[in-house]
Image: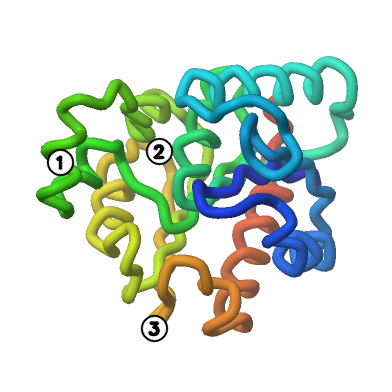
Amino acid sequence: MRCFFFHGNGGNLSLWQDFLIGLYHHSLSVLALDYRGYGKSTGSPTEEGLYRDTEALVGYFWDKVHRLDHKVIYWGRSLGGSIAAFATTIRKPDGLILEGSFPSKQSLLNHYPVLKILGIFSKYRFPTTEFLDGLSRPVLIIHGDQDSVIPFKEGQKLFEQLKTEKYFHTLPGANHNDLHLVDPKSYWERITQFIDLIGSGQDSH
């Protein structure tokens, strides 16, 4: 099974090597990118730029690399959840995993009064649930109940707004960047269950 991984705003792929290796060990062939301005990628990050990078990667994969006998999962964590949601508007995957993510920038800003004021002057939107409107693929949402960056309630709100087959997995005691570390057994068991669900589904391509 193939997996597109979209990382969050903090850091780059070099910080997620152990996690990416974990995906490989769970029977996932992984394709990931550093957006413009992240890691060794040139340019400056903007919301529109992140979408263009995603369009290029997704288009290349489906046109040049994809095989019909392989299922495809998009996996986005934190800000990458919104990018993964955008990717579904280009080409639908067989399943979607959103980890520590949020419904939209505006929803997230409601938890931070100072940033909410600054948000009035920002053109960034990251409308995750808007991108997913009409999606008819299974979605797994994972969130730590001690997340200090994207509050747990945001993950719940995202789940409630989805209109497709959906699953929610809470990781007690997990913050924002340690979901796969706090309780690896629970984390990977739930991932494996979701992968098996996708793998047993009918070919949608």
Q: Is residue 153 above or below residue 9?
A: below
Q: Residue at x 88, y 29 (%)?
A: 67
Residue 32, percent from left and from top: 74, 42
Q: Report the mark closest to the observer, 2 or 1.
A: 1
Q: Residue 125 lies in what quarter of the image?
A: top left
Sequence-earlier tag: 2 or 3: 2
The foreground one among 38 and 60 is 38
In the image, 52: left or right of 120? right
Counting every numbered tag in the picture gives 3
Q: Residue 201 lies in what quarter of the image?
A: top right
Instruction: Identify the residue position indicated by label 3 in the image.
Output: 173
Residue 66, percent from left and from top: 85, 27
Q: Amino acid at mark 1?
A: Lys
Which quadrant of the rendered structure holds the C terminus?
A: top right
**Labelled disc at residue 164:** 2
Q: Tag 1: Cα neighbours inside 10 Å, few (<14), some, or many (≥20)?
A: some
Q: Report the mark closest to the observer, 3 or 1.
A: 1
Q: Tag 3: Cα neighbours inside 10 Å, few (<14), some, or many (≥20)?
A: few
Q: Amino acid at mark 3?
A: Gly
Mark 2 and mark 3: span between their CA atoms? 28 Å
Sequence-earlier tag: 3 or 1: 1
